[in-house]
Amino acid sequence: MAAFDVFIFDIDGTLLDTLPDLTAVTNAVLDSYGFPQHPASEILHFVGKGGRRLIEKAVPAGTSPDVVDEAFKRWQGVHEEMGIRLTQEYEGITSVLTELKAQGIKLAALSNKFDGGVQEIVPHFFPGLFEVQHGECDCIPRKPDPTGLLLTMEELGVAPERTVYVGDSKGDMVVAHAAGTYALGVSWGYQSKEELQAGKADRIIDAPASLLEVAGVC
């Protein structure tokens, strides 16, 4: 019997390396306003709290909220046009997800990415593997608010103690504990092990194959 019934995943930095596309899309929007652009190393520090927050950090200090709102809407449009051209899954992810599903474990995704982006990217890279996927929207606030994670478990009909939330950030570990799930950190993403430890990760893994060990199916 598997140790858990459901694995719910963060997306950016956990399942997919989306930083190249986030950098390209953000800089395209900044350029359209004549704002200075940022290297990927700086964009990395802006991600993790949703697209609007990324834009807030990327635009020059003192930019009006109205311009930020407009730039974020433009960012969403550009993302729809070119937002997954450079994105790649982390090596071994699809094979591990396929094996988890074959073992009867349900898979879902919960991201701070805007919901439209989530509904596009998950089926594109992982067709047929995920039962539920959610991003930030009017009814699902950004993590570490546990609303989205609790909703996802309700939709899947699973108890928190039988659920793993998998992510690469301190916020992911915080939301996992807030919802009562097992908090599994991955070291290959965008934050350090120290950040995951600060979020009180129950365990940190260094390779996707270790997901099978956590699931108890290998």
Image: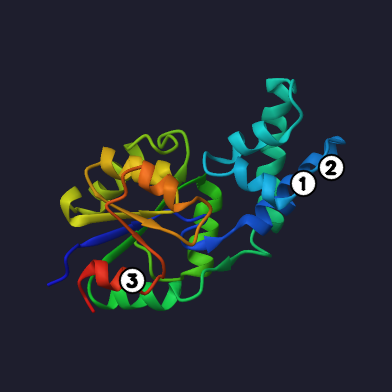
Image x and y of residue 128, in percent: 40, 71
Contact flag, marks 3 and 2 (Cβ < 8 Å) = no
Amino acid under disc 2: Asp
In the rendered image of this protein, does residue 92 appear above or below residue 78? Answer: below
Residue 100 relative to residue 67: left or right: left
Residue located beneath label 3 in the image: 210
Measured in 3D between alpha carbons, the distance from the residue under mark 3 to the one under mark 2, in whole angstroms, is 41 Å
Residue density around tag 1, few if under 14, some if 14–19, many if 20 or more, within 10 Å? many
| Label located before the other in sequence (1 or 3) | 1
| Label located before the other in sequence (3 or 2) | 2
Mark 1 vs mark 3: in front: 3
Q: Please name whichever residue, 16 or 208, is drawn nearer the observer in this view of the structure.
A: 208
At x 34% / y 41%, what residue is drawn? 175
Q: Place residue 61 in its image quadrant.
A: top right
Amino acid under disc 3: Ser
Contact flag, marks 2 and 1 (Cβ < 8 Å) = yes
Mark 3 vs mark 2: in front: 3
Image x and y of residue 112, in percent: 48, 44
Mark 1 lies on a secondary structure that is helix
At x 39% / y 46%, what residue is drawn? 172
Way the structure is coloured: rainbow
For the C terminus, which image quadrant? bottom left
| Disc on res. 31 | 2
Image x and y of residue 81, in percent: 70, 55
Q: Please name whichever residue, 83 or 10, is drawn nearer the observer in this view of the structure.
A: 10
Residue 114 relative to residue 140: left or right: right
Residue located beneath label 1 in the image: 27
Amino acid under disc 1: Asn
